[in-house]
Image: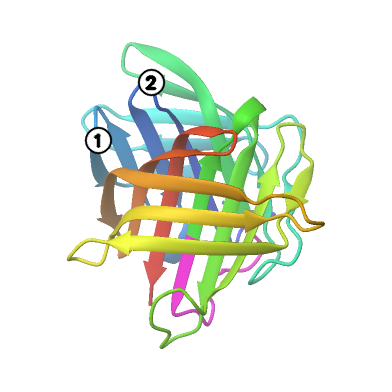
């Protein structure tokens, strides 16, 4: 990958009814997690392109997906690290014997968001009318839990506009291996507007290249669909 976003990229796509979900990244050597028929597995990912993004997921039944947005990724203000740009593209996943048009998300960084971090989290959640909710959390080395991590969240509309949340709170439950099983987001837009709350439970997750990633079932205010959770620890 070259050009804008060369410092880091996370993207995903999926359809809850079809039982398909994927999250791919080029951070820290890269990797991907593929959810199919309720089972999640780690796999290698080949990510290419600067505008339209093409993702190839390896395996016995390889999947190729094209993520295409009508507009350039929108800049996200006040991030915890670097200056990411994000979009809510349409994805076309080419499967064995056919294809699937579904929702997607794509976030790029000009510099690696892992620089100087002890932990880094990235969440993407489907919203209504083609929009996507993006949240990132960045923690210094040595922090216990994510109560002190710097968290930011935004809604990226299908048309390209961005709504930043004034305050974002993230909670996570873990299994015995310290991998996420449930997550909750409470997002405050400011101006006395009511918060957006999201509850997410894990469908399946796996570790790829030292990074854990999972596909979630999400519900909340205007939300009913798939979510993605990436967790990197130094």
The location of residue 174, given as percent across then percent down, is: 28, 62
Tell me whether circle 2 and circle 1 mark residues in contact (CB < 8 Å): no
Location of residue 157 with respect to 177 vertically, above or below: above
Location of residue 53 with respect to 172 vertically, above or below: above
Q: Residue furthest left?
A: 176
Q: Is residue 46 visible?
A: no
- Earlier along the polypeptide chain: callout 2 or callout 1? 2
**Which residues, given as a range, are shown in magenta?**
109-121
Q: Residues within 10 Å of mark 2 (few under 14, many from 20)?
A: few
- Residue under the image location 48 percent in, 44 percent down: 47
- Residue under the image location 40 percent in, 67 percent down: 232
Residue that carries the numbered disc 2 in the rendered image: 17
The location of residue 65, given as percent across then percent down, is: 47, 29
* Badge 2 element: loop
Q: Nearer the viewer, mark 2 or mark 1?
A: 2
Residue that carries the numbered disc 1 in the rendered image: 59
Q: 211 or 29, which is in the foreground?
A: 211
In magenta segment, residue 120: yes
In magenta segment, residue 225: no
The location of residue 175, given as percent across then percent down, is: 22, 61
Q: Residue 201's image quarter? A: top left
**Prevailing secondary structure class for the magenta stretch in the rendered image:** loop
Q: Is residue 92 visible?
A: yes
- Residue under the image location 67 percent in, 59 percent down: 84
Q: Quadrant of the C terminus?
A: bottom left
The location of residue 8, given as percent across then percent down, is: 56, 60
Side of 14 relative to 132 (left or right): left
Q: 169 or 119, which is in the foreground?
A: 169
Q: Residue furthest top?
A: 97
Cα separation, mark 2 vs mark 1, equals: 22 Å
- Residue under the image location 59 percent in, 35 percent down: 127
* Badge 1 element: loop
């Amino acid at each position: 990958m070259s050009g804008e976003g060369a410092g880091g990229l996370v993207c995903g796509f999926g359809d809850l009814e079809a039982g398909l979900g994927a999250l791919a990244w080029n951070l820290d050597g890269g990797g991907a997690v593929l959810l199919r028929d309720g089972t999640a597995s780690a796999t290698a990912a080949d990510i290419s392109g600067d505008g339209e993004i093409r993702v190839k997921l390896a395996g016995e039944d390889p999947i190729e997906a094209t993520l295409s947005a009508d507009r350039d990724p929108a800049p996200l203000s006040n991030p915890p690290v670097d200056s990411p740009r994000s979009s809510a593209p349409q994805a076309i996943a080419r499967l064995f014997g056919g294809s699937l048009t579904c929702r997607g998300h794509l976030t790029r960084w000009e510099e690696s968001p892992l620089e100087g971090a002890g932990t880094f989290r990235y969440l993407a959640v489907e919203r209504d009318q083609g929009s996507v909710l993006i949240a990132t959390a960045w923690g210094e080395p040595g922090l216990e839990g994510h109560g002190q991590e710097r968290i930011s969240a935004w809604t990226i509309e299908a048309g390209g506009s961005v709504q930043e949340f004034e305050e974002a709170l993230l909670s996570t439950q873990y299994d015995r291996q310290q991998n996420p099983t449930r997550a909750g987001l409470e997002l405050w837009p400011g101006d006395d507007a009511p918060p957006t709350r999201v509850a997410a439970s894990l469908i399946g997750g796996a570790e790829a290249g030292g990074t854990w990633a999972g596909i979630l079932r999400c519900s909340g205010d205007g939300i009913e669909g798939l979510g993605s959770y990436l967790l990197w620890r130094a």
